[in-house]
Amino acid sequence: MNKFEKVSESQFNKDCVSFGLNLNIENVKLPVRATKLSAGYDIYAVVDFVLEAGQGITLPTGLKVQLDSDKFLAIFPRSGLGFKYKFALDNTVGIIDADYYNNLKNEGHILVKMTNEGTKTLTVKTGEAICQGIIMQRFLTVDDNSTGERVGGFGSTTKQ
């Protein structure tokens, strides 16, 4: 089952505090597609923010995603923000694996780190779409024999 959900209020608050933010989980909107043929599910800002040229921000989204085992979520900046402001994800494309959701040490909270790489000031209001997630299928090679299990958040697969 592929499904977006809100993280728990305690997880949201913990992650917000770690980035120096005091946010309300009530501002979290579940992602939706803008049109019936849209590929991406819009992910929305949970806080107002202003970024001058060259500034970046790490934003808790308040979201996690349950995915079928053969799927992953790819996160991209919204096209309009990229064209107008060169607003970009710091890791270019975010990849959320199916086992990121509710694993042993991690609830699966999706965070996005983005930078205004342009020359104009970017102003975003709470509830505005900042990036988009596309659910995609992953394929395995015939000789794949991976058996490891994720037990954490960012970078946890490199610690195995």
Image (cartoon, rainbow, N blue to C red):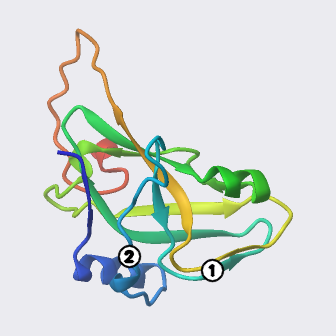
Front residue of 33/1: it is: 33
In the image, farthest residue toward the top:
142
Marks 1/2: CA–CA distance: 15 Å
Residue 125, given in percent of the width and then of the height, sits at 60, 79
Instruction: Look at the picture and state if 122 lies above or below 67.
Output: below
Q: Which mark is residue 49?
A: 1
Instruction: Say left or right for 157 vs 87.
Output: left
| Mark number, residue 126 | none
Q: Position of residue 67 (x, y in %)?
A: 23, 45
Q: Position of residue 7 (x, y in %)?
A: 26, 70
Q: From the image, state whether disc 1 or disc 2 is nearer to you.
A: 2
Task: Using the rendered view, name the quadrant where residue 25 is placed.
Answer: bottom left
Q: Residue at 44% x, 49% y: name it.
A: 133
In the displayed structure image, the side of residue 84 where residue 24 appears, left or right: left
Quadrant of the drawing holding the C terminus: top left
Looking at the image, residue 26 sits to the left or right of residue 41; the answer is left
Q: Answer few, some or many: residues within 10 Å of disc 2's Cα (few below 14, many 20 plus, some between 14 and 19).
A: many
Quarter of the image holding residue 110? bottom left
Occupied quadrant, residue 74:
top left
> Height in image: 57 above or below 97?
below
- In the rendered image, the quadrant that contains the N terminus is top left
Residue to which mark 2 is pinned: 28
Q: Residue furthest front?
A: 36
Residue visible at 46% across and 40% down in the picture: 37
- Dot 1 crowding, Cα within 10 Å, few <14, some 14–19, many 20+: few
* Point 32% across, 28% down: residue: 138
The residue type indicated by label 1 comes to Phe
> As shown in the figure, which amino acid type bears the numbered disc 2?
Val
How far across and down, in percent of the image, does residue 142 sit? Answer: 23, 9
